[in-house]
Amino acid sequence: MVETVKRPDRSTKTGGATAIAAVVIVVVAVAALAGVVVLSLQGGTARGDTFDLVGWIAQGVATLAFVLSGALIVSRQPRNVIGWLLVVAGLGPMLSEVIFVWLIGMDPAPTQASPLLWSAVWFTNWSWITLMFPIFLILLTFPAGRLLSRRWRWVVILCGLMITVMLGLTGFSPELQVMTGDEVLVWSIPNPIGFLPEYEEFGLQFEFVWNRLLLLLTIVCVTAVVVRFRRGSSVEREQIKWPLWAMLFFGVVYALGASEGGFNRALDILFGLVLAAIPISVAIAVLKYRLYEIDRIISR
């Protein structure tokens, strides 16, 4: 009689590892958010007005929603790239905010760049792309985490090239600058490895090309969602509806802010809420949780 040897279940090991990774991601995100609050209070950079503070917290909760939704997908579907993209889109800006609050709280301002300081300023100068490009890629691969076909690979390559250019531009600029969201310079120091010319010499040409490429990516990624919706099954169409409505509300609020020439205090709060709705809706759609209730919710 031949005895059969049971092989270890790799899926169980993988599931356990991703579950641990998801917990670690959530812990890091919560610690980062707490770090922002503590450093802001200690350094006196926290918003003084209650209304402003609520808006600031709303946007912090929105970034946390990206991390939590991504971690949930990673724990359930570790091979779905959308979960990891959501984690990057939330964790990147959150860590950047922690570092930024630390940098602007330096007193006196530094006069030379140590390796740690260089890395910190460099990261804060390009960290905004950790939110923008993952959203592009989510639109491109939603809901299964795969491209429609190989013909769409050029979009991923274009995203990679643009990210590489931005990393190089911020890493080899002549100065390391710490600036507020209102483009107010806090302090700057010479970059020890900077060899690029001053931004004023080529800034207009670069911004022209960069903005056109961002517009191209937006059009192509939205087109991918439309194509997937038309070709998809009934389940896929229900999946697409959830983030579609969330992004529509987000677009309305963003357009209101743009038409006003900037976000006021009420729009800051609303912006945080609609931004949080995007990752939550994506998680609901990917995990297929109560999909068919979206029509009833919207009709109400």
Image (tube, rainbow, N blue to C red):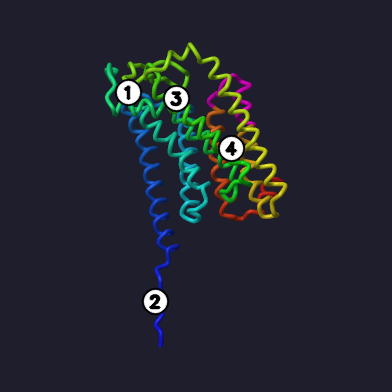
Magenta residue span: 252-265
Distance between the alpha carbons at the discs numbered 2 and 1: 62 Å
The amino acid beneath tag 4 is Trp
Residue 49's disc is 3
Q: Residue furthest bottom?
A: 1
The amino acid beneath tag 3 is Asp
The amino acid beneath tag 1 is Gly
Q: Residue at x 58, y 37 (%)?
A: 155
Residue 5's disc is 2
Q: Which residue does the numbered mark 4 point to in the structure image?
A: 154
For label 3, the crowd category at 10 Å Cα-Cα, with few meaning under 14, some 14 to 19 and many 20 or more, is few
Distance between the alpha carbons at the discs numbered 4 and 3: 47 Å
Q: Is residue 124 left or right of residue 274?
A: left
Distance between the alpha carbons at the discs numbered 1 and 4: 42 Å
Q: Which residue does the numbered mark 1 point to in the structure image?
A: 105
Q: Are marks 2 and 3 in contact (CB under 8 Å)?
A: no
Q: How far across and down, in percent of the image, does residue 281 sit? A: 58, 46
